[in-house]
Image (tube, rainbow, N blue to C red):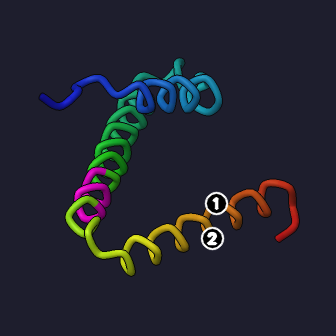
Amino acid sequence: MPKLIKPKAIIYGLTLYLTFLSSFSEYPMYLVLSTITFCITTFVAISTWSMFGFVVSTQSDNEKVIYEIKLILVSLLLYTAASLIDLI
C-alpha cells in the first residue's frame, strides 16, 4: 500500500509557505493559486522520483547501468555541493 502522506512533501510545503507564501495570507486568491501550484509540483516531483526508482530496480541486474547511474548521481551531488559553497 503506497503511503499517502509523504514526510518530504510536508516539510517542503512548510518550508515553502513559511519562506515565501506567508506574505500572501492577506490575498486568499494568491494563496489558493500558490497552493495548487505547490500540489502539482509536488505530485510531479514524487512521480518522477518513483518512476526513476522503478527503472533502476528493473535494471538492477545490469552492472553497467548501475555503475552509470551511480556515476551520474555522484556527479550531481558534487555539483550541488560545489554550487552551494560558491565554487561554481
Please state which of residues 88 and 42 is positioned toward the viewer in this rendering: 88
Q: Which residue is identified by label 1?
A: 77
Labels 1 and 2 touching (C-beta < 8 A): yes
The percent coordinates of residue 69 (x first, y second) are 44, 71
Secondary element at image label 1: helix
Secondary element at image label 2: helix
Q: Residue sitting at 36 percent across and 42 percent down?
A: 42
Which image quadrant for residue 2?
A: top left
The percent coordinates of residue 26 (x first, y second) are 53, 18
Which image quadrant for residue 20?
A: top right
Q: Is the magenta stretch mostly helix, strand or loop?
A: helix
The percent coordinates of residue 77 (x first, y second) are 64, 60
Badge 2 local density, few (<14 within 10 Å), some, or many (20+)? few
Q: Residue sitting at 47 percent across and 29 percent down?
A: 13
Q: Which residue is identified by label 2?
A: 75
Q: Residue 58, relative to residue 64: is it above or below?
A: above
Please state which of residues 38 and 47 is positioned toward the viewer in this rendering: 47
Q: In this view, does 57 lie to the left or right of 67?
A: left
Residue flagged by tag 2: what amino acid is it? Ser
Q: Is residue 84 left or right of residue 63?
A: right
For the magenta stretch, what is the residue range?
Answer: 50-56
Q: Residue sitting at 12 percent across and 28 percent down?
A: 1
